[in-house]
Image: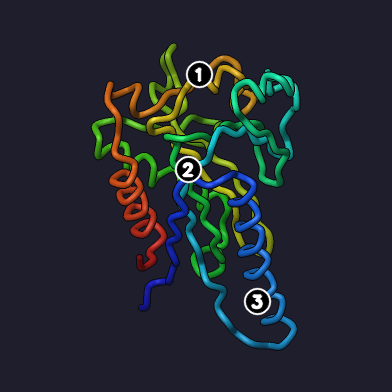
Amino acid sequence: MLKRAVTIRRLGLINYKEAWDLQEKIFKELVDIKIKNRNDNTSVLPQNQLLVCEHPHVFTLGKSGKEDHLLLDNQGLKDNEADYYKINRGGDITYHGPGQLVVYPIFDLEQFFTDIHKYMRFLEEAVILTLSEYGIHGERMEGQTGVWLGVGSPVARKICAMGVKSSRWITMHGLGFNVNADLKYFDYIIPCGISDKSVTSMQYELGRKIDMDELSEKLVVHLSNLFDFTI
């Protein structure tokens, strides 16, 4: 059986709005193909894409989030050189910035499996497997998305946040994996609406900076194995 094809696009450090616009463009193209297939009784496969990048400092608020979970006013955003966007993914507020690996899978899940729960668990599993290569034990927390450390302990902390959107089984948005991120920016929000848990990074846990290119390669390999696609 032929593996699914996924185009990997490494965007480097890219403004959040620019990356969001690119996601929306690709997302619409894939959805339009599926609508045309249905209307014309054709079977053109939408081209799955995986965007890998970092962003300058930015806070994003999902559809179910609360604006007061951002603890900065407009002047505070300016002082910290940060942008703020209300966006169309699920979830609450989160932060992206340099040193955080951001991955946006724009997948036609009908080419993989039609199960959003399974999709989210696969994203988490790719991060957990990547962490294990560095000697870090990542876990899931019951009732929460993303990847955590120290689950069940008084020092449970989140290392990877996730939020997605899906329409006609096409996905967008994705995950933010704290590798060398500046953790002080998480003090300016109530991350994902959770006030009693902290946030961490690989750099903080290991006491050293991580090679972002090396780590992103490892994560992409784990994604390709889990979703069974070629890279």
The residue mark sitting in front, 3 or 2, is 2
Q: Nearer the viewer, residue 86 or 41?
A: 86
Kindly identify the residue that appears in the image at 65 percent across and 63 percent down: 25
Q: Quadrant of residue 207?
A: top left
The answer to whether residue 145 is visible is no
Lateral position of residue 201 relative to residue 59, left or right:
left
Mark 1 or mark 2: whose residue is earlier in sequence: 2
Residues at circles 3 and 2 in contact by the CB criterion of under 8 Å: no
3D distance between C-alphas at marks 1 and 3:
43 Å
3D distance between C-alphas at marks 3 and 2:
29 Å
- Horizontal and vertical percent position of residue 79: 63, 20
Amino acid tagged 2: Glu
Vertical arrangement, residue 143 with respect to residue 109, above or below: above
Per the image, label 1 sits on a secondary structure element best described as helix
Q: Which mark is residue 184?
A: 1
Per the image, label 3 sits on a secondary structure element best described as helix
The answer to whether residue 76 is visible is yes
Residues at circles 1 and 3 in contact by the CB criterion of under 8 Å: no
Amino acid tagged 1: Lys
